[in-house]
Image: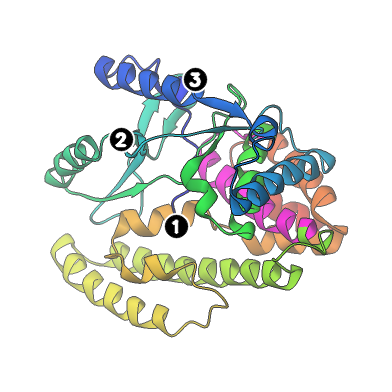
Amino acid sequence: MRRLALLLSAVALSACSPSYAIHASYEEARILLRREPITEMLRRPDLDPTTREKLRLVLMVREFASGIGLDVGGSYRSYATIGADQTIYALSAAPHFRLELYTWWFPFVGRMPYKGFFSEADARGEAGDLRGDGYDTMIVPVAAFSTLGWFDDPLLRHQLSEDELALANMVFHETYHNTFFAKGAHATAFNESLATFVGFHAAIDFFATRVEATTSVEQARDAWEDERRFAAFVQALASRLRALYATRDEASALREREDLFAAAATEFKELAFHGRRFERFERVQLNNAVLLQSLLYTRDLDVFEALAERLGGLRPALDVIERAARAAPADPFAAAERALADLG
């Protein structure tokens, strides 16, 4: 829910809001100008051991990502310290009675289902306007973003608070955005869901080779299993909501969806996860925007996993998925499903 591919360099060229564009450009420049090579940081004798180990881990993940064909470029070979005033907040919205994300238009990337802010007050102000127009909203702080290879994305200070598995997953996820980025009607969900698959699967492969890591390959596999269990939950809830919205008038749908959300919250608490990664979802107030943002990152994960199992691993699966998506940009999810069916 917190990992969004915010192409701030493109946002900065948006003609729809000059003040927003100027602010986004300024803040992105502040981050990029504070970059320091990780290799230089590792030479510091006073660097605390935990930070040293995590910085080394990031460099090893970069090397592994390059070895499996990801376009790492200059991403995550530098570190940037940012202040609390540079936290990025992502706003998303959806109509009260329809599972359809509101979108904003930006140059180069087109319509995107979220908008980034460097001010929580600004994000809340726009969210209030959207709620007044009949939309559910969601605002989350962003843990990571990708400029899709336009700039060398640095590791940020708050990311070092993540454990080894989350840190490796993030680097794989974001560098995959540099490697492949589909365009089309379903592009955002496809790109994010496929990057979710890459992040977890590559982390499993990585930790299988790192016997000295404190994270075991079994922990990485458990995390992937949790992600797929969560994906099944949100997809089932979405199916129930779509059926409700299709068969009720707006007043009835508004009443009945709250009962459905309450039942879903109870059901979610009973799910057996290996880790605590989804605790925040348990506390959030469910609405259409919250659900749809979760769906952006979790669609068809089992299809991608089945292709990896049938084809013998992550890299051959990605070759097939990417080829299918390029051949059918109007619906890359359906193209991936056909590719799986063609395997017999």
Q: Residue at x 48, y 66 (%)?
A: 235
Which residue is disc 3 drawn over? 33
Q: CA distance from mark 2 to mark 3?
A: 16 Å
Quarter of the picture holding the C terminus: bottom right
Question: Under tag 1, what secondary structure?
Answer: helix
Q: Is residue 18 above or below residue 311?
A: above
Residue 270 to residue 120: above or below: below
- How many marks the image carries: the answer is 3
Q: Nearer the viewer, residue 17 or 26?
A: 26
Secondary structure at numbered mark 2: helix
Magenta residues, as a range?
180-206
Q: Are marks 2 and 3 in contact (CB under 8 Å)?
A: no
Label 1: how many Cα within 10 Å (few below 14, some 14–19, many 20+) = some
Is 266 situated left or right of 69 in this image?
left
Q: Residues within 10 Å of mark 3 (few under 14, many from 20)?
A: few
Front residue (pair 169, 260): 169
Q: Nearer the viewer, mark 2 or mark 1?
A: 2
Q: Residues within 10 Å of mark 2 (few under 14, many from 20)?
A: few
Q: Mark 1 sits on what residue?
A: 294
186 vs 286, nearest the viewer: 286
Q: Note whether 176 is above or below 258 in the view shown.
A: above
Badges 2 and 1: C-beta atoms under 8 Å apart?
no
- Based on the picture, tell me whether residue 183 belongs to the magenta stretch: yes
Residue at image mark 2: 85
Q: Quadrant of residue 298?
A: bottom right
What x and y, as percent, mark residue 111? 42, 31
Q: Distance of mark 2 from mark 1, alpha carbons?
A: 26 Å
Look at the numbered disc 3 and give the secondary structure of its residue: helix
- Asked if residue 327 lies in the magenta stretch, the reply is no
Residue 291 is at least partly visible in this image: yes
Q: Is residue 209 left or right of residue 289?
A: right
